[in-house]
Amino acid sequence: MTTAVQEPHETSPVTVTVDGQARTAAVPPRRLLVHLLREDLGVTGPHVGCDTSQCGACTVVLDGVAVKSCTVLAVQADGGEVETAASLGGDHPLQQAFHARHALQCGFCTPGMLMSCRALLEEHPSPSEAQVRSWLKGNLCRCTGYQHIVDAVLEAADG
Amino acid sequence: MDDPLDDPLGDVALPGPLGHPVLRREDERHLRGAGRFTDDLAPRDAVHLVVVRSPHGHARIRRIDTAAAAGMPGVVSVWTGAELAGAPAMTGDATAGPLRPLPVQWRLPGMAITEHHALAPEVARFHGEGVAVVVAETAEAAVDAAEMVDVDWEVLPAVTDPRAAADPDAPVLHPDLDGAEGNVLVSLPAGGGNFARARRRADVVIQRTLRNQRVQPTPLEPRAVVAEPGADGRLTVTTATQAPHRIRRFLAESLGIGEHLLRVVAPDVGGGFGAKLHLHPEEVLVAFAARELGRPVRWVATRTEDLLASNHGRDQVQEAELVATSDGRILGLRVRIWAGVGGYLSGMGAGVPAINTGLMVTGVYDISDVDVVTHVVATNTPRVDTYRGAGRPEATYLIERLVDDLAIEVGLDPVEVRRRNLVRRFPHRLPSKAFRLDSGDYEAALDLAVDLADLTHARRRQQAAREEGRLVGLGVALYTEFTGLGPHRALNLVGYDNGGWEHARVSVHPTGDVTVRVGTADHGQGHATTYAQIAGAALGLPTDRITVLEGDTDRVDHGNGTYNSRSMATGGMAVHQAATAVRQKARRVAANALGLPADDVDLVDGHFVVLEPSTLARGLRTVRHGARGLAGAAVGRVTRFQLPDDGMGRHSLAWDEVAQLATSLATYPRGEQPGLETSAFYTPKDMVFPFGAYIAEVEVDPGTGEVTIAQLVAVDDCGPVLNPLLARGQIHGGAAQGLGQALLEGARANPDGTSATGTLQTYAIPRAGDVPRIVAEHTVTPTPHNELGVKGVGEAATIATPAVLVSAVHDALRPLGVPRLDMPLTPARVLAAIHAAQDRS
């Protein structure tokens, strides 16, 4: 019997555009997008905080949609466009508001939090506090108690 | 009212940038996704280490076969626990002993010490304990090979509850351990006075058993370690730790090598909360493998590994008896604590309950007759050690629950019964005599909390809600804790194998810019910002001229690390002292250059200026200046620096000029060493005791059991607040973790000892929708023990929040006659209690 199933150690080339730059790596079929980004491409924005898609530290925007990059296989992202926190430059209103409002402490959740918040503001440009808190349920932060993050999002929305 | 944080210091004056909400310099890299956490720094050629872990709570290894794993593609090496326990220590000396067990830093008097090997050689005593390691070229290959390690287990009976484990019939984890009584490693008294006499005098006796459940600290970055052998024979270990120097010391001991052969680096660390303070097995294993293989080795915990095999917190069963008069005056307190410390003792695992809880059970109250015994008990669970608050949340919860019960019993308002028992005179020696509360105004904090919560109106609202059948509750909790762990003598007397000092070095570059090196280790607190504020205040410099270095044993000479909210009260004081000494030396250099005694010069707005000199000094200066003019002319030819003359000598020198003078030597004071650099070991005179008052208003949904927090008021007093923005961030984060313990979190074990909460799907930490907007304000009562008057704030809210929320939920449920509930007050638990109460009525 022949089979098309790829062996775990065999690799396929995957090309993604990361923050505007086309990047290619050969990856095994089980590799997740977050590991393609981190291990193969050296992109340090998305972080791995859990193994059950609970924490959201790996959130990136893939083809315009905020996704937890631990829920996407690298091969599924082939040909796709990935945006990480680096794509925000340095003076995005969310970055400014996070800084001004002390919306980060250890910084580990921050890149994923920012990408999730950006997606929020694209969908709800003037969210209520309840909307912000509801949206952020997919991103865990263990340091800030969320209040300053919520304040930062509301400030960025106003600005 | 206006935000009092706009005027954060009350009437306490702090110099320069201190007291202001300076924005963090740490933020920029994280906001760009350019933070450098341990796993970001792993070299490309690093091999990956995977730990093979016990699937059982308690089991003996009959046989372990690694041949199949070793033959898997990409595998570099496989070691078992038995092999490592027999391995020669890595001194190059074949006669040296095996790898040594992990250290136990807090050895209480009379305590039996368990041996924790980096991998279990014979018996695994908790679910997740390592028994073998596989090292392979990739993470995937290592994971695949680890699956092939074949262990033949003999499953043993397990015990996970600390009080059950103290039973003489319980399965014994360490049957051959000298000095242990079954699983009880030590029973330590911590009381004073005469409880029996107090009980005889009492009208009211409140008895209850409280469970302070086991929680999992869960910093968002799982632990990670990378070790790289260097060409110089040294090993660099990069690890997600709160205390690099401590890790270096204990890692060197475990490996059997000199500390000088190790460099330990803590880069960006993604939260710690106490769980990243102590040496863990993986640090030993990764370092061992790197030296054996001569290659960089990397280990990154999965979340499940982090939940299973990192240190946990709390886990106490407390039997308590509070005795009082019928008018609510507390006379005495008797407490028996069974504290689970897990399968093995960790660094401070035994001290947390026996000292941090045992000595603090009286809280903010003046209780003179106290009888406490803490039983430190081994159980088939991960090790328990420091977790944010470390022992003080357990003490606070205990006394505050009892005081609430007392209020009900004697028919007093819970605020009033607290008022009647507060400690009011300071210093106040606790009954144990071991601690002395340094300073406080507990009633001021309580009054502010009552005002902010608008308690009178809140009570009316509650009454109206109750008449509608709604379950609304108001809770109050007061706390005091201790921070800035020290001084040495007190620590050493209770078996703590470390000084309470912190170290800082302040170096002025010839340009006048400054580097501060300090032995604490930031993991989200914003040290680079706050230490720059402290040094800037002492040196009269803007903070952007100051660089702060931490977290690297090669760059910072000495250190104790960041824990016990000690960074500002000890690290900050070390920086303050070193910077102040540098300022004094700069003053002497400047004065000498100006031809004046040091007392005639001071640093004002970045310049050393001549104070109004006396006639005598003026004359003296003219003579000195004449002499200096000759010498200066000669020096001016060989150095680029020459003091411009204003006829009577210069009247001021800029900071930068003095910095240059200090190394150019042209006009150097006699008998002084060149350079502007000082190091300081700051040793606290005594513990310092922050305190505060919290009030919560909650509503319980009788249909779902869900608790909604309508308001949470936090009033904390940590002395003068150095950076109000960052302090408030600590309160918010601490309150969220306290809320987690109160309402959501609990590490649960199955009867066989396996974990039932090994993922974030089964272990709930608070999300944005769970945490209310917190009203965080403070009073300011400086400590007399240090010049800045500062205490610590990092753990405050985690200490007070469980007590206040549980107080409020019980108040909400009172009309139903619901009995006392243990944390976490999950919807399921609350609903079950409501149903049970309804069934009874």
Image (spheres, grey):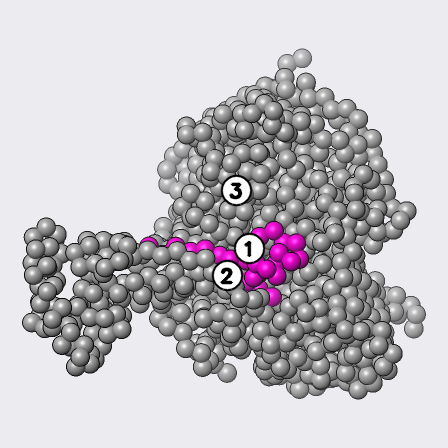
> Answer yes or no: do the residues labelled 2 and 1 have beta carbons within 8 Å?
yes
Determine which residue is flagged by label 2.
Answer: B683
Say which element carries label 2: loop
Tell me the distance, in whole angstroms, between the alpha carbons under discs 1 and 3: 16 Å
Q: Report in which chain the residue with disc 1 lies.
A: B
The part of the image, by quadrant, that contains residue B71 is top right
**x and y percent of residue B652 in the render?**
18, 70
Determine which residue is flagged by label 3.
Answer: B248
> Which residue is the extreme one toward the right?
B840
Task: Give the camera-side residue of B781 and B161.
Answer: B781
User: Which mark is in front, 2 or 3?
Assistant: 2
Task: Give the camera-side residue of B781 and B2.
Answer: B781
Crowding at dot 2, Cα within 10 Å, few <14 / some 14-19 / many 20+, comes out as: many
Lower position in the chain sequence, tag 1 or tag 3: 3
Magenta region, residue range: B482-507
Determine which residue is flagged by label 1.
Answer: B499
